[in-house]
Amino acid sequence: MRIVNIGPDPSLAYRPNLEKSETKGKEDYRNFESGNLFSRVFNTYSLMHTNQTLEFVKQKYSEWTHCNHTQMGMMNAIMSLDQLVDESDPDVDFPNSFHAFQTAEGIRQAHPDKDWFQLVGLIHDVGKIMALWDEPQWAVVGDTFPVGCKFQNSIVFRDNTFLDNPDEKNSKYNTEYGMYEPNCGLDNVLISWGHDEYLYRVLKFNNCSIPEEGLYMIRFHSFYPWHSHGDYMHLCNTKDLSMLPWVKEFNKFDLYTKNTDLPNIEELKPYYQSLIDKYCPGILQW
């Protein structure tokens, strides 16, 4: 397996004040209009929205869901994200491994009785490991959206980034339902390819015992048009609607635990390794 170092040395991670974390209000998160990282973020989404067509997504499902790329344990996969800075994230500019432990610790504090939920917080972004195997970040990170039907207005940068996507002009795919039936269920909807679906498939392939609520959190946590804006409800079935509150609960920790107060990962590792051993043990197929 060849690892491509596309991020900074984690020892040089952004730490403007080690004694006091940067305070942000909820309104300061997901700023897609301005900021130091705007150009990088906009470029990533522009490439994503141009290239993530129905045919592209089908190709990626075929390429990645057989889990025949490598073998490794979950903790090693998490720590490999030391090498990854998410180019779609307007909130932070430090390696993704820190965000994993921040999210998990936020959930652990609020839900001490749900160890599987804590583990979901830790591993939810591990599918981004594809970017270390030469997959472009626009096919790995960022908000997701269905392909094969109309691109809804709540998608980030919707107005000016889909102009060169051929599905935008295809009458089979640019209507409200497109290729889908009403209330067909999200399990039957093809979502733009990224780390959510990939990790979900890895967990299913390896028979990991995370509850269904946790699997939904992992599979759809980047599907902001659905869980945060209420779009695509016409494609949902009763199971999707029953799982939506869990995805919304997870989103609070995924988003609002991001700050510059970086956790001591070495101190936390033994506890989270015990959760990995319980729900995703051993060497996994990726």
Image (cartoon, rainbow, N blue to C red):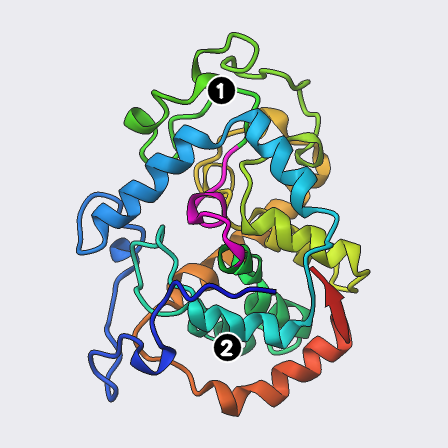
The residue nearer to you, when weighing 14 against 11, is: 11
> Residue 104: percent from the left, percent from the top?
53, 73
Q: Residue furthest right?
A: 207
Quadrant hosting residue 179: top right
Name the residue that disc number 1 marks. 150
Classify residue 271 as left or right of residue 188.
left
Classify residue 92 as left or right of residue 168.
left
Name the residue that disc number 2 marks. 105
Could you tell me which residue is drawn at 72 percent across and 53 percent down?
67
Quadrant hosting residue 138: top left
Q: Is residue 57 above or below residue 18?
A: above
Classify residue 110 as left or right of residue 70.
left
Q: Is residue 141 above or below residue 148?
A: below
- Along the polypeptide, which appears first: circle 1 or circle 2? 2
Question: How crowded is the residue under tag 1: few (<14 C-alpha within 10 Å), some, or many (20+)?
Answer: many
Q: Is residue 107 visible?
A: no
Q: Is residue 43 above or below residue 88?
A: above
Mark-to-mark CA distance, 1 and 2 = 37 Å
